[in-house]
Image: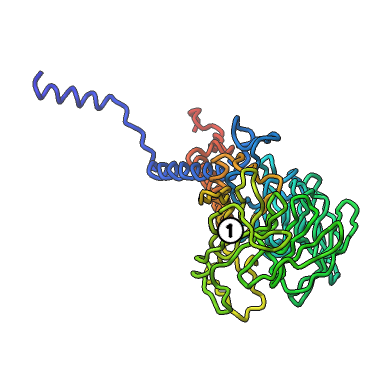
Amino acid sequence: MSDQALREVLHRLAEESRPARVSPDTWQRGRRRRRRQVGAALVAIVGVLVGVPLLPPALPGAGPSPAGAERPVVPSRVYPPLTGEATAVEDPPGPAALVVAGDQELRGSDIWGWEGRSLVVGRDGSYRLARTVGETAAGTEDLLLSPGGRRLAAQPWLEGSHWPDDPVGQTAILDLTTGQVRQYAGGMPVTWAPDGRSLLVMAQTLDGRLGRLSLLDPATAALRQLPQISGTYRPGNLAAFSADGSRLAVATSDALHIVDLAAGTTRTLIALTPRDRLAGPGAWLPDGDRIAVWSMGDCEDGGGCDEQRLARRPIRIGYLDARTGAPATGPTLPPAQGLAARLLGWQRDGDAVVAEYQPEKRLTKRPDDQLWSETGWTQVGAVELREFRPDGSRPELVELPSGALFVDVPADLLDSFGGPSPSWPEGAVRRLLALWWPLGQFLVALVGLVTLVAGWRMIARRRRARLDANPAVSGLGTSVTPRSPGAGDGSG
């Protein structure tokens, strides 16, 4: 076929073919489709952020499972609480595995009335908030878990309680199995007895001196006053019960006292220097013959001390004979390091469970600071829960949220670390929402709202464009002009 014949055939085929229909708004439609795809992706992301925390309990093998009697229940990792997390009063979690208090995502705001939003982790892995009117500590001066974890003692600013007009102070106790809160007269909570049947409370004072100590029976509200002990004190590691609950060690700033609870007597065991501290609520060794004490390695010379020195100072453990006060032998443990240390208790193999506190950024200890506290909310900048071993190692027992400043674990669970934690999708969402808390969570909500509004507007524009392109769809139809009489019939 010649070139001329081929051209004629192609021209003829072109004339016979139907032209492609190209809408005049093709470009705009493409842009709208792109916006819809982006909007759908944003909606999916927001849906994942909001919905994933609700999914793990329904997924097979996901999330924590209730632990048996011999299974570890204290989780190896704790994630931040979510906004709107259920509270321990509204939805009791049952006996707790630990409680964490602190700043950032563990702190609320005056805007909604709860400055403290501490996290209670149940033995089944459930998360609940313990809300307080003010910022609060855990274990040192507030939020004390009973040995079995069923009850939570606090100052009477805990949700469900009311601040009393009582100069001595009161204690609120929350039953974590029922959500019931009861208030008791006699003073503020200090530490639980080993059997969990009584709580040591201290009358509130305004001069920094030790108030009257009493034993509170939560079952009957009976109050038994203990012999008077005079002197100033350090709130963090004030008192410790012996393992059998028959004796109580109480540390003032300058002496360590032993109270015989059966006889109702007290004696001074030994004088303390400014460097000496009672080791914590677990200071008594299991044999009941020795008491552990800390020796602060720096910043106790009467002068000022900056954050770097406070963070580096070693805190070494020593032991005293509980009968004579003479130095005694005990497990050779590595030193703690930082602002303060609190010995929670001993494991069956002889290892110690220690909460180690670090100073707040740019913290300075001044010699004339009457409000100084090594375990105060404004002084503590971080906390770690560690196991101190005779081989010199100090593994971390629980990975806590970045905002954690205080932690408390029931005394009966010190051998139950390594329990289940939330699944990784839930943990990732909790950490993401905790970024820049609470601004981050507000931003996520704002993104969701903007996405929904943008999606609705795109759908509305698409519908209007469709109606403009095909008016008949709108129900108006195409107008038809009636024929005039005689039109089209040839008359005329």
Whether residue 260 is situated above or below residue 426 in the rendered picture: below
The image shows residue 235 at horizontal and vertical percentages of: 70, 66
- Mark 1: few/some/many CA within 10 Å (<14, 14-19, 20+): many
At x 59% / y 65%, what residue is drawn?
A: 295
The answer to whether residue 448 shows anywhere in this view is no
Q: Quadrant of the N terminus?
A: top left
Q: Secondary structure at mark 1?
A: strand
Q: From the viewer's side, name the closer residue of 336 and 146.
A: 336
Q: Which image quadrant is residue 74 in?
A: top right
The image shows residue 419 at horizontal and vertical percentages of: 62, 40
**Badge 1 is on which residue?**
356
Q: Which image quadrant is residue 100 in?
A: bottom right
Single out the residue that lies furthest toward the top. Answer: 1
Number of labels in the image equals 1
Whether residue 19 is situated above or below residue 105 in the rendered picture: above
The image shows residue 415 at horizontal and vertical percentages of: 65, 43
At x 51% / y 51%, what residue is drawn?
A: 392
At x 59% / y 59%, what residue is drawn?
A: 317
The image shows residue 370 at horizontal and vertical percentages of: 66, 78
The answer to whether residue 208 shows anywhere in this view is yes
Q: In the rendered structure, which amino acid carries the disc numbered 1?
A: Glu
Single out the residue that lies furthest toward the bottom. Answer: 368
Whether residue 248 is situated above or below residue 28 in the rendered picture: below
In this picture the colour scheme is: rainbow
Judge from the rendering whether residue 168 lies leftward or rightward of residue 406; answer left or right. Answer: right
Q: From the viewer's side, name the closer residue of 474 and 29.
A: 29
Single out the residue that lies furthest toward the left. Answer: 2
